[in-house]
Amino acid sequence: MESGVKTVQTLDCKGLLCPLPIIKLSKAVKGVRIGEVIEMLATDPGSVPDMAAFQNQTGHEIVGSDKQGEVYRFLIRRTK
């Protein structure tokens, strides 16, 4: 995980299954400025391939990801 990244919002999607985390992230990204980073927490293992697809389809950048226990953590930078 990239250290020193300042996040402007944490999106808690723990317990939600696909496609809800991506839907919530899509809405949240529209509420931050270009260049700002959102932290998303999820427990659905499907969130890993979903986030790769989200990055490819939207162009927003995943600047970091890791897993701590059952929680997947993603840092997403709005690019446009």
Image (cartoon, rainbow, N blue to C red):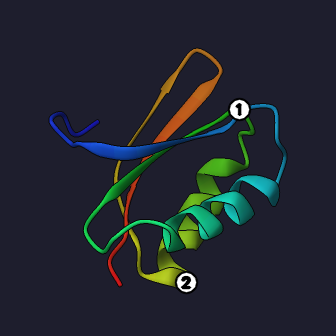
The Cα atoms of the two marked residues, 2 and 1, are separated by: 22 Å
Q: Is residue 54 left or right of residue 80?
A: right
The residue pinned by badge 2 equals: 57
Residue drawn at point x = 60 percent, y = 50 percent = 48
Q: Secondary structure at mark 1?
A: loop
Disc ID at residue 43: 1
Q: Quadrant of the C terminus?
A: bottom left
Q: In the image, 25: left or right of 19?
A: left
Q: Nearer the viewer, residue 67 or 14?
A: 14
Residue 58 lies, in percent from the top left, at: 51, 82
The residue closer to the viewer here, 19 or 46, is 19
Q: Who is closer to the viewer here, 29 or 66?
A: 29
Sequence-wise first label, 2 or 1:
1
Kind of residue indicated by mark 1: Thr
The residue that appears at 65% across and 20% down in the rendered structure is 70
Give the quarter of the image for residue 69: top right
Q: Residue furthest top?
A: 69
Relative height, residue 69 to residue 77 (above, below) = above
Badge 2 amino acid: Gln
Dot 1 surroundings within 10 Å: few (below 14), some, or many (20 or more)? Answer: many
Give x and y (percent) for residue 6. 23, 42
- Where is 45 relative to 46, above or below? above
Q: Residue at 64% x, 68% y: name it.
A: 27
